[in-house]
Image (tube, rainbow, N blue to C red):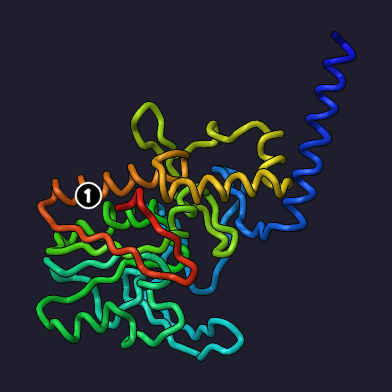
Amino acid sequence: ICLNTALLLLSIIVSLGIAEFLARQFFDISALPPFYVGEFENRESENFVVDEHTGWRMRSSHMFMWRIGEDGEDHTYKSNVDGFRSNKEFSQQGPLVLLGDSFTFGTGVAYENTFGALLENRLGTAPFYNFAMPGFGIDQMWMALKYQASRFEPTLVVVAFVDEDFTRSLTAYRKYEGFNKPSFVFDHGTLRLQTREDQPPALAKYIRRNLSLANAISLNMEQLGHHLPLGSWWTINANILQQMAQDAREEGVPILFVRLPSMGQREFATLS
């Protein structure tokens, strides 16, 4: 029995070692592993500040130049007093509200070429208030609706996202932006904010962050979530979208979800 058990364990270890080797050799494992509440401090930023509800926003009444990529152009990014990219203050009730990530924020384009500004100029019916921020996940868009946009009693809410924003919901810290952010867990059928107590054991974190095989499994679960309602990648975000829709219904405001097309985009049957 002892010999057979030892041989079984050895075969499992060898098999996992081969799988890890193949994952490192043949797969592009580029996704960052999730981070958890309390693991990192916020980094100081010249252009963004901590927001207690969404994680970060622009500095109030601030302007800076930003070039995206080596071949990109310099563009001016200017915030209003509330810390959002806009050429006007947010004061009027009943605006059309935009929520989203860097695409909606307009990273890489002049303000007049953001789709919010284009829509406002073409429609001319009501102002567009843009609460999007670079790096936002679906969870942060929900918090922006709940704590920032709702107080203006919008007449329409547009939530624009890319598939990567679903992955961003699974981490409590964004390494690129250098800020902590809200992150939710689905606990007994209810969404609740992640706490320090929700951190997995140290061994599980080590495996997730150091083994390409674990990362490959995570990426495959994301791909599976595009077709079947399985895994935390799908479950948490689906419930966030449903909660946003419910919040909008309770406020009596229509809400429109827009999936922005991106290169290499796969079919997303579960979202439909």
Q: Residue furthest right?
A: 3
Could you tell whether 7 is left or right of 104 in the image?
A: right
On the image, the x and y values in percent for residue 272 come to 29, 53
On the image, the x and y values in percent for residue 260 come to 36, 68
Could you tell whether 36 is left or right of 59 in the image?
A: right
Please name the residue shown 48% across and 46% down the image.
224
On the image, the x and y values in percent for residue 135 come to 47, 64
* Camera-side residue of 161 and 93: 161
Question: Is disc 1 placed on a helix, strand or loop?
Answer: helix
In the rendered view, tell whether residue 30 sits above or below residue 262.
Answer: above
Please name the residue shown 32% across and 65% down the image.
160
Could you tell whether 101 is left or right of 203 in the image?
A: left
Quadrant into which the N terminus falls: top right
In the rendered view, tell whether residue 265 sits above or below residue 17.
Answer: below
Residue marked by disc 1: 245
In the rendered view, tell whether residue 143 sits above or below residue 263.
Answer: above
* Residue 149 quadrant: bottom left
Could you tell whether 5 is left or right of 153 in the image?
A: right
On the image, the x and y values in percent for residue 76 come to 43, 87
Tell me which amino acid carries mark 1: Ala
Please name the residue shown 14% across and 60% down the image.
153
